[in-house]
Image (cartoon, rainbow, N blue to C red):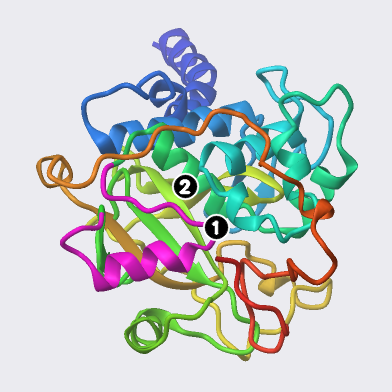
Amino acid sequence: MRHLLTRLLALALLLSPLAAFAADPCPLLRAQVDAADPATRLAAAACEEHLRWHRPFIDERGRYAGSTVREAETALLTSGEQAWRRVAGYWQGAGLLSRLQQRPGAYDCTLAPFATQPSAACRAFLVDVPWSAAFVSWTARRAQLPGFNGSASHVDYVRDAYRNPETSAYRVANPVAARPARGDMLCSVRAANRVFGFAGLATLLSSEDGGLGMHCDIVVGAAGEGDANAYLVGGNVLDGVTMRILPLSAGGQFAALSMRAIEDPPCTPDTPQSCDANRQDWAVLLQLRPAAELAALTPSAPLQLAAPLVSPAADRPAGSAPMCCVECSVGDGLPRCP
């Protein structure tokens, strides 16, 4: 009996890494980008990219690990592609670069697939301009998600879901009370001097059309069998495509979702309790509509093939193309990019 118990214990120890690996839905999902279900296609497209970026992640306690490749580097992804070219491809494939011709480096990024040498101007653009919304927009096109209007700014499609639920792929819900599901998006507000929450964001969306710094992650797995975590994938997190793990309650809701407060001290060696990458102003859960409802919406535009813009911004007369902001903040003095 003792030998049997010893063997069972050894087997459990050997299988424990496999059990931990199995909790991540991406290795199985990545091959389902052509699934019939839109939610599965969206999650699969996000997972495919996460594995391409060497699987960096933020665990359920807000600690991050595995970040080995950065957005503007020439270091290689698992596919053998240079990281900066991949990020430029998100902008290009989502059809968003043409809207940002005012930004230095945008034209150079259209040449990324053809450049024989790394482009300093494009790489600077990728660092200076937040690309998380471009990643979401690219992923939605990759998944052929109907009813989703891509944008360089998350707040645009959050506003679309709030104001036009009949024609949008998503409906808004309070992230504290709703149950996340595959294909949903969990979104936070990035405002240093204010905390919005669901009620504050709803008030802003009802009354304003301006910009607002936000970030959204795509839910790729939630409430799986034997797993009490939700798994989300977002772009421009740790300068790459990163997975976020959030605990769920027994009812399948986010368990004690870590919410940012104005009085929170900054993350420093003196205040390590504030160093939680999951502690955000989580303001809305975008819930993906059922497949039958999505089928009645406007079909998705295809991924845009690589092609340079008609003319680079650098060739325009001085003053004809002023700088603009993507994630705008009050007081930055720049107009919002169209």
As drawn, 81 above or below 196: above
Dot 2 or dot 1, earlier in sequence: 2
Q: Quadrant of the N terminus?
A: top left
Q: Locate residue 273 relative to residue 96 in the image: left or right.
A: right
Asked whether 229 or 119 is in front, the reply is: 119
Range of residues picked out in magenta: 146-168
Percent from the top left, x then y, of residue 164?
Answer: 23, 67
Q: Does the magenta stretch include residue 145?
A: no
Identity of the residue drawn at 40% across and 41% down: 140
Occupied quadrant, residue 158: bottom left
Q: Distance between the residues labelled 2 and 1?
A: 8 Å
Side (left or right) of 46 relative to 314? left
Mark 2 neighbour density, 10 Å: few (under 14) some (14–19) many (20 or more): many
- The residue pinned by badge 1 equals 152
Where residue 269 appears, x then y in whole percent? 84, 71
User: Quadrant where the C terminus lies?
Assistant: bottom right
Residue tagged by mark 2? 137
Q: Report the front residue among 262 and 101.
A: 101
Camera-side residue: 37 or 117? 117
